[in-house]
Image (spheres, grey):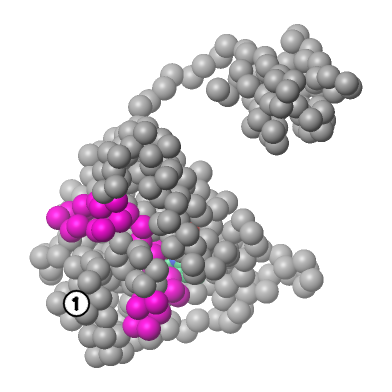
Amino acid sequence: MDLSTEIAGICFKNPLLPAAGPLTGDDSKIEYIASLGVGGIVTKTISTQPAHVPRPCIVATRDYVVNAELWSEYGPEKWIDEFLPKIQDIELPKIISIGYTKEQIEWLIPRLTESADAFEISTHYVGKDITPIAKITSIATKLTKKPVFMKLSPHIPDPVEFARAVTDAGAAGVVAINSLGPVYHVEPKLGRSPLGSKDGYGWISGPLIKPLALSIVRKIKQSLDIPVIGVGGIKDAGDVVDFLEAGASAVGMLSSALIFGKEQYKRILDGLEDVLRRRGYSSVRGAIGRKLEREEARYEVRNPVIDEEKCTLCKLCEYVCPYFAIRVSDHVEVDSKACFGCGLCESRCPTRAISGILS
Ligand SMILES: Cc1cc2nc3c(=O)[nH]c(=O)nc-3n(C[C@H](O)[C@H](O)[C@H](O)COP(=O)(O)O)c2cc1C
């Protein structure tokens, strides 16, 4: 099956990229991640000064990661003189992530452009105002012939406006989304945040943020015909295809590799063909943007239908029903007057014995 995809004239052998972060933080880490089969490389964000990173800086549960990592702990000279020359032989497109201010971008791009197939510019610490971000984009795109992707942080109030402003200013596309926050994670054994950052705040990412990331990618693609790299909460091949169907041309993943292990990149790639085939696609490109239709709100109430062969009488539907409409004895009884048709029972049924509302 053809897993390749193309963005701004760059061909990727498959759509799964490592999102900017510690796993692409120097040449040896990049080499290891490349060996897992990813379609391209996105470096840790490089700025004009090394980041002074508080420790501890990463904590995770099964559902999310909270980090206080800032950008690369190595200065640009180390990247230019040491790391980037060492990864030149890796035959994958290399997207160099840089940040943040106009002055920093002006300093960085001329020195990095030779090593880059494209740039990703982080706007994470630039604030919520789109005007300076558009200005940075326009400066960046004048300094290099390589495509420039602008990375959207979810605290930007209007993602579509962001995407429109940066592409009008010359960006080749948008990367959506960065981590969300600031957030405060309490470590149970401490009763407080374990992070070394000021007051313990950090940025949240991982499976928990997937619905937000997906909604932002969809909103952008429903309004604008521009390339989007979808990032946020991907943990398996099904998630990758969800982002492709929402219009992403490629995807980035980081937190699930921190939660489940770095081999998650390989596991996802191993399962990708199968998921695409099951959803009726014969290529990655064939899946892109296939679930973008807008739908009107619906108000018709439908009651759950119980498949008694599949039902194990576990009672979860009764326990969770917020309208007190289900009783389970030696069978499942639905009070059709009390049932609000909300769909929760169907979404929570562990044996898929309930249908008729969501489906
Ligand atoms: C530990 C850590 C470090 C990160 N560092 C960067 C960074 O240097 N530059 C950047 O643009 N995003 C950075 N991110 C954000 C990720 O690239 C990504 O946008 C975000 O985590 C959402 O994707 P995910 O849920 O797959 O992790 C970092 C995230 C984490 C968890």
Q: In terms of depth relative to the viewer, which is nearer, 77 or 259?
A: 259
- Please state which amino acid type lies under the numbered disc 1: Ser
The residue positioned 52% from the left and 61% from the top of the image is 256
Q: Position of residue 359 (x, y in %)?
A: 55, 22
Quarter, ligand 1: bottom left
Q: Position of residue 313 (x, y in %)?
A: 82, 28
Q: Position of residue 77 (x, y in %)?
A: 27, 89
Can residue 36 be seen here? yes
What range is drawn magenta here?
3-32
Relative to 136, is 66 on the left or the right? Answer: right
Q: In terms of depth relative to the viewer, which is nearer, 317 or 49?
A: 317
For label 1, count other residues whose C-alpha is less than 10 Å away and answer few (under 14), some (14-19) or many (20+).
some
Relative to 172, is 334 on the left or the right? Answer: right
The residue positioned 25% from the left and 68% from the top of the image is 92
**Mark 1 = which residue?**
115
Q: Would you say residue 135 sits in the magenta stretch?
A: no
